[in-house]
Amino acid sequence: MTPAIYALLFVLLAPVFGGLLAGIDRIVSARMQGRVGPPLLQPFYDVGKLLQKRTRQINPIAEPLLIAHLGYMAATGALLLGGTDLIFTVFVYALAALLLVLAAGSANSPFSFAGAERELVVLLASEPFFILMMVAVCKVTAASTFGGVLASSQLVAVQLPGVLLAFVVVATIKLRKSPFDISISHHPHQELVSGLTSDMSGRLLAYVELAHWYESALLCAFMVLLFNWSVPLGLLAFAVAYALEVLVDNATSRIKWQLVLRSTWAATLLLCGGNLLALFVMGR
Amino acid sequence: MSFFSRSPWILHYDGSSCNGCDIEVLACLTPLYDVERFGVVNTGNPKHADILLVTGSVNERNIEIVRNLYRQMPDPKVVVAVGACACSGGIFARAYNVQGGIDKVIPVDVYVPGCAARPESIIDGVVQGIAALELKHRMTA
């Protein structure tokens, strides 16, 4: 199959993957709390309902921004699997995330705006890692595309264990998990009402949810990059990492933004930077 | 096909309740009753909510808040009055600042009696609220 078909498959199947993952997440979280939890397909019911509900537009610019957020999030995965340069893909990913901030900031409500500001902070915390991760992957495999990395004879995770650990830390931000879920969380009650999505209703919230499903699938693809020898191994590693995220989500409370920034930058610098430095010293 | 019956998101507002009914509302979320089995989410945001669950009566201080929350909810929406005070003002009905039940301020679809309302009857009230939600969706769609 050509990379274009992989890109198309991502656009079509990633929402199914992300939705099912969200459903499994809710069931596992409920079981950890001694509850039965919702049906597996609950996230699909939720999005279906949001699309049927009347939408209140606070600022008419929010809808085009959120459609672009969804479009760019899908495009990021499609570009990655379609064989575009890895570092370019990360920049498109950052643009997709920024569009959500703009949409939330456009509402001019204190909760939404504070959510947007916090989202900027978590972007600041996570973006350096993703750029450094792609640089490291390109350096180790001497390839700059998804297909190239998968075809490489080097197993990335063995060469870059520090990057793998830092990825698990930073993915907590992207998966909206505690303790880093300061701008928006999947748990209904928080100090900012719903943070970023406080003023989004009906289909606007459905776009955000769909984009998040694409994002989960994208993070899974990033994990496959790190376990490039076999795709099932990458999926298994993602499942283990996700289970760990759910456990941490249920066991920790939200922290202040300063600590989010410090801990993720420390993980990026020490684990990711240290890993690269070690490779440099060993002369690879 | 309508998804409203599978994913009713609830906004809980405590008017001037004694907290008896509020504790029973929260009990519905605990492992014993676990309403999330039916897709119910207790959201803190009127813009995401389908069902407004009000406990306690309305008084001079919270009339505008109840109205504001109701107006912020996008259609279709349903109001469930939980407990004797929310239904009629209860034992506080004749207090100098109390206006009476929630229906003095916003239209109520389901009345759940009890002092305090039992979790079973609150869940039953929500289920009847879902039926009203479906009806409203079909009338507007």
Image (cartoon, coloured by chain):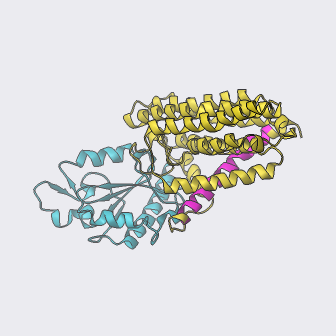
Closest to the observer: A233 or A18?
A233
x and y, in percent, of residue A27 in the image: 58, 62
Colour yellow belongs to chain: A
Residue A92 occupies quadrant = top right
The answer to whether B19 is drawn above or below residue A235 in the figure is below
Colour cyan belongs to chain: B
Can the viewer see residue A63 in this picture?
A: no
x and y, in percent, of residue B31 in the image: 47, 69
The answer to whether A180 is drawn above or below residue A133 in the figure is below
The answer to whether A136 is drawn above or below residue B103 in the figure is above
Q: Is residue A181 left or right of residue A167?
A: left
Q: Which residue is drawn at 50% across and 57% down?
A: A251
What predominant SS class does the magenta segment belong to? helix
x and y, in percent, of residue B140 in the image: 49, 49
Q: How many marks?
A: 0
The stretch in magenta equals: A7-31
Q: Is residue B114 left or right of residue A250?
A: left
- Residue projecting furthest to the front: A281
Can the viewer see residue B36 in this picture?
A: yes
Q: Which residue is drawn at 42% across and 51% down?
A: A189
Closest to the observer: A207 or B128?
A207
The answer to whether B105 is drawn above or below residue A67 in the figure is below
Q: Residue at x 25, y 67 (%)?
A: B84
x and y, in percent, of residue B53 in the image: 36, 58
Query: Is residue B65 inside the magenta stretch?
Result: no
Q: In which quarter of the image is the N terminus of chain B?
A: bottom right
- Residue projecting furthest to the right: A1
